[in-house]
């Protein structure tokens, strides 16, 4: 056997991990301002490819370049997990920005300066921006469970703006900057700032990005426009990234600049480098938030599912309640150990002091 043949037989397919922390459900880790990024960075050291979503990687003005991470909006993630869409990694996207007409002139200018700064300092490629022809009218809602969601009064104005950015501006990914209610005195906001509540904005942000991705099949993420909050000396470290300035836009533009393009299935000809759901080796998800579409889809496949019990949420949808086979672990640190063993082809039970004998079927 030649050296070339020996090398080819020893190679393995890329090890792919999907990391999900649902938005707006008060996750103990990943329910705040990019506080799941340390988890993503760690998983990316074990995996060849990490697939995750903006809620995990967005930290307002903070972000971290993870070369082997794919930034996929939640609706796109669901379609990918269902095998309907594939992911095509890119070197760079042309990112277009839609501004809600409801954003005040001064606040819009601050966001435009941020956008220009990403062009000059980070070398991102942006199109000219579009302002909606009417205010979006964002409204925030809270479910009985405590999870947050929301609506927009004028979805048509958003769709028209995005269509113009794609058709005229040549945008390949879309950032939305919508004016959100400030509601500075609300109890929910105060709890969130103390690291105890649910992100009051996250559910409405998901509604906006889902609409764009479903309609246009392009990468999309949202950055709310808000007035700065009064200083709070007891601010939680998990919430602090959102209070560094006037804007949440930097992490969104960075994420979208390398977000994979969404490929409808069946593709005419699958291209080298495209990723499909049957290539996902492991899914990591909070143990009480297993009812999402992506989790349900991958539970019907050969994907290994790891449920992290320490990452509690306001939901109580466990793998056991849904009949999903999952490996229960206490923490993300333990999940990393399971990933290492799985990638090595080692049964995790072999790493413990006791192992049972085989029995006749």
Image (tube, grey):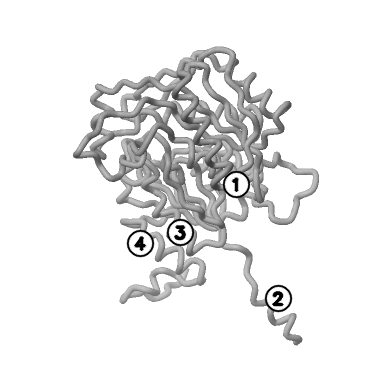
Q: Check disc 2: other Cα within 10 Å, few if <14, some if 14-19, many if 20+.
A: few
Residue identifier under label 1: 123
Pointer 1 or 2: first along the chain: 2
Residue identifier under label 3: 43
Dividing the picture into quadrants, the one containing residue 357 is bottom left
Residue identifier under label 4: 334
For residue 139, above or below residue 192: above
Give x and y (percent) for residue 328: 36, 55
Cα–Cα span, label 1 and label 2: 38 Å
Cα–Cα span, label 1 and label 4: 38 Å
Q: In the displayed structure, does residue 96 sit left or right of residue 225?
A: right
> In front of the other: label 3 or label 4?
3
Q: Residue 32: give its label.
A: none
Residue identifier under label 2: 8
Q: Are marks 3 and 1 in contact (CB under 8 Å)?
A: no
Check disc 3 and report its element: helix, strand or loop.
helix
Cα–Cα span, label 3 and label 1: 27 Å
Image point (53%, 40%), residue name: 117
Check disc 4 and report its element: helix, strand or loop.
helix
Check disc 2 and report its element: helix, strand or loop.
helix
Give x and y (percent) for residue 190: 24, 30
């Amino acid at each position: 056997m030649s050296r070339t043949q020996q090398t080819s037989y020893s190679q393995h397919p890329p090890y792919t991990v999907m990391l999900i922390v649902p938005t707006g459900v008060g996750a103990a880790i990943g329910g705040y301002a990019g506080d799941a990024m340390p988890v993503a960075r760690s998983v990316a050291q074990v995996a060849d490819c990490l697939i995750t979503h903006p809620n995990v990687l967005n930290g307002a003005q903070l972000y971290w370049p993870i070369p082997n991470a794919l930034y996929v909006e939640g609706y796109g993630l669901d379609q990918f997990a269902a095998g309907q869409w594939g992911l095509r990694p890119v070197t760079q996207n042309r990112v277009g920005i839609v501004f809600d007409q409801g954003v005040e002139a001064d606040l819009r200018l601050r966001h435009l300066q941020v956008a220009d700064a990403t062009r000059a300092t980070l070398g991102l490629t942006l199109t000219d921006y579009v302002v909606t022809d009417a205010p979006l009218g964002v409204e925030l809602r809270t479910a009985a469970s405590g999870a947050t969601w929301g609506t927009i009064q004028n979805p048509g104005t958003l769709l028209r703006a995005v269509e113009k950015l794609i058709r005229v501006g040549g945008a390949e990914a879309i950032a939305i900057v919508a004016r959100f209610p400030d509601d500075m005195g609300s109890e929910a906001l105060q709890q969130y700032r103390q690291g105890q509540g649910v992100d009051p904005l996250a559910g409405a942000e998901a509604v906006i990005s889902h609409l764009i991705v479903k309609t246009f099949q392009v990468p999309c993420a949202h950055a709310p426009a808000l007035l700065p909050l009064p200083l709070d000396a007891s601010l939680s470290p998990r919430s602090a990234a959102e209070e560094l300035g006037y804007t949440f836009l930097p992490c969104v533009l960075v994420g979208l600049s390398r977000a994979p393009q969404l490929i409808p299935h069946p593709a005419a000809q699958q291209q080298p480098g495209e990723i499909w759901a049957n290539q996902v080796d492991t899914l990591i998800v909070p143990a009480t938030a297993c009812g999402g579409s992506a989790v349900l889809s991958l539970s019907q496949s050969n994907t290994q599912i790891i449920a992290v019990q320490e990452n509690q949420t306001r939901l109580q949808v466990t793998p056991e309640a849904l009949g999903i086979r999952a490996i229960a672990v206490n923490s993300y640190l333990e999940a990393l150990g399971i990933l290492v063993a799985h990638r090595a082809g080692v049964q995790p039970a072999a790493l413990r002091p006791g192992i049972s004998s085989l029995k006749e079927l």
